[in-house]
Amino acid sequence: MRLRFSILVTLAAMAAAAVAGFSVAAPNGPRLLAQNSGTIAVDVELVLAVDVSYSMDPDEQQLQREGYIAAITSREFMLALRQGMHGKVAVTYFEWAGIHHQQIIVPWRLIDGPESADGFAADIQRARYTRASRTSISGALLFGAPLFDGSGYRGIRRVIDVSGDGVNNNGPLVDLTRDEVVAKGITINGLPIMLKRPTSATMDIENLDVYYEDCVIGGPGAFVIPIKERDQFKEAIRSKLVLEVAGRQPPRRVVPAAAASPRISCAIGERLWQQRWGN
């Protein structure tokens, strides 16, 4: 029987504030990560993939950026960084919407202390805001996976961190794409944003966190942190980045899944789009 992990994580044990609602994917991950051609050894190569589709209103976009800026420059992030084998990570930040809209905001950057973290955060802050149509999580994954090949770094772990407020409705099926990316030795974590009540106009779903658990995340130790309140943004993003940099398995409560198949259809976004627009 497939297992799904529902998690309550207390970052007090990791020098951070508590955030509830974590879920962790079963560690039935791929083969060991192969060495890439990078020359600088780091603890993790981290791709931050951030949703800028039209369903993200300007206020949410601002909160999202501010959350990453605050997280990367936080004391908790620095503490996690120093606990690593190398004491440094490589990070890149891009924004995505439909299958043909991905834009790198900050290219690969080494973060090894407060000064480099401040520089990375400043580059996020000064970037112009953009929005675009459709939601292609699969497109974000397909864009993010090859970025590791040219990063110039050699990470112990490779992680794609996807944040968004909707289901995949454009591009390849998300679960098949997830499996393809995970097979390359990449872990996918998720930050589903669940601030609005779903309506037929937005084509959102009620249990976006479950969709992310079953259809988006994957790889050893993959987890989901849902955001259901606006005041959770900064704390949740900080918690997620601390876990990713530290590379630790948080405490978890194991809950057997009701069935081997996903609890929500991984093609629900495509079906909702077709029902509304007929294509």
Image (spheres, rainbow, N blue to C red):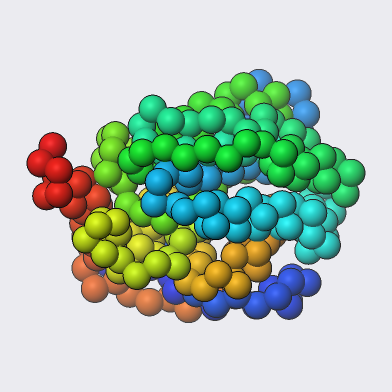
Residue found at the far front of this picture: 58
Q: Is residue 139 visible?
A: yes
Q: Is residue 185 visible?
A: no
Q: Quadrant of residue 207?
A: bottom left
As drawn, is 82 to the left or to the right of 69? Answer: right
Identity of the residue drawn at 83% across and 46% down: 118
> Which quadrant of the rendered structure holds the N terminus?
bottom left
Q: 257 above or below 28?
A: below
Identity of the residue drawn at 29% across and 34% down: 171
As drawn, is 117 to the left or to the right of 181? Answer: right
> Which quadrant of the rendered structure holds the C terminus?
top left
Q: Quadrant of residue 263?
A: bottom left
| x and y, in percent, of residue 248 in the image | 65, 61
Q: 94 above or below 76?
A: above
Which one is in front, 105 or 240? 105
| x and y, in percent, of residue 254 in the image | 43, 76
Identity of the residue drawn at 78% across and 42% down: 122
